[in-house]
Image (spheres, grey):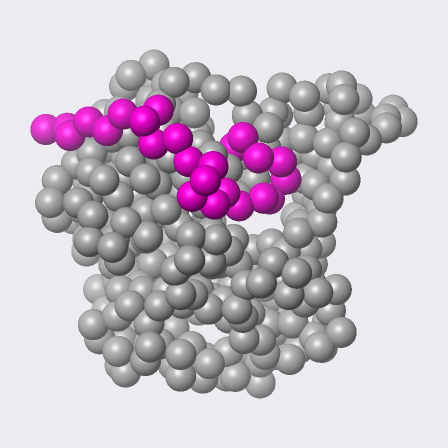
Amino acid sequence: MILTFTPNPSIDRSLELSAPLQRGEVQRLVASRRAPGGKGINVAHSLHLAGHPTLAILPARADDPLLPLINRSGLPFSRVEIEELVRINTTVTEPDGTTTKLNGPGATLSARAQIELTEKLLNHSCQAQWLVMAGSLPPGVPVDWYSQLIRTVRSLRPELKIVVDTSEGPLREVVANVADAAPDLIKPNALELGQLLGTDGRHWEQQAEQGNLAPVIRAARQLNEQGIPEVLVTLGPAGALLLCPEGLWYATGPEMRPVSTVGAGDALLGGYLLGRVRGMSPEQCLGQAVAYGRAAVELPGTVMPSPGHLQPTRVTVTRLP
């Protein structure tokens, strides 16, 4: 089983426009959708659609509108009761695929809720091969909470593989605490990778599109040398890069017209983990991951792809020196 933990879940509302967004104007929508959101929930949903056992752990009130959306998807989940409703994240998608996200801060987690979530993690980790801790941290928790949870879980399950997919302060704390709380895998995008090293990672993504992977490779190696065994970097239209003990790989595909980029990185991570638990080689795992990410980009809103959406033959994987 792959266990996911989403401390700051959301209801994702996707708004599609028929023309470019005009600030200050009235525009009519082509479509409006609602879906359960949060990185860990998205990863678990992609695994569930592929038929792999998974469980999503999250905080939510018993009457939260998020729960019927999760039930409708069929995704197995376990929740901890909290006082506030989860946040609503709004995504505005323009006809050319340009995506603007407006994310809420999230429901505050009390000390009691934090303890109960930690206990759930420990209880369910006994049946898991991998644990994915993903997304932003909500109000009320310390910025290094992911590192604290890694230490706690490893004290019970030292062999459990742990993934962290987050950004900004929580990601910096994860890297700062690798000496005694290193995850087995992190999945930053170019922007998040740049945040770690104090530079504009978006420029790295642009360079990758032009064929220059050197800055991203140097940054990934730096994280690897600090103690993180696997670094999976998503590069938007330029594909993804994987640095692991077996070597270095880069995967990309032909140019495509995006429908929505929301959740593409989560689908990519789900595809990668499916490959890992099924014994695929690093090259095959990365190829499947990028196939999942590309499939997600061609779907509206936060819709996660199923295996039937994949086009793996459109992905090229290259081993780099």
The location of residue 261, given as percent across then percent down, is: 54, 34
Q: Nearer the viewer, residue 243 or 279?
A: 279
Q: Is residue 148 magenta?
A: no
**Image point (26%, 58%), residue name:** 277
Q: Nearer the viewer, residue 238 or 193?
A: 238
The location of residue 157, given as percent across then percent down, is: 26, 78
The location of residue 116, given as percent across then percent down, is: 52, 84
- Which residue is the extreme one toward the right? 26
Above or below, comparing residue 232 to residue 150 in the picture: above
- Which residue is the extreme one toward the front? 308
Above or below, comparing residue 247 to residue 62 in the picture: above
Task: Locate the C terminus and report the quarter of the image it occupies.
Answer: top left
Above or below, comparing residue 197 to residue 129 in the picture: above
Question: Could you say which quadrant of the image residue 232 lies in?
Answer: top left
Residue 141 left/right relative to 291: right
Q: Is residue 303 magenta?
A: yes
Is residue 43 among the parts visible in the rendering? no
The location of residue 302, given as percent across then percent down, is: 60, 44
Residue 15 left/right relative to 135: right
**Image point (34%, 58%), residue name:** 163
Q: Nearer the viewer, residue 154 or 4?
A: 4
Residue 175 left/right relative to 51: left
Above or below, comparing residue 27 to residue 129 in the picture: above
Is residue 249 among the parts visible in the rendering? yes
Start-end of magenta stretch: 297-321
**Image point (59%, 28%), residue name:** 259
Task: Locate the N terminus and report the quarter of the image it occupies.
Answer: bottom left
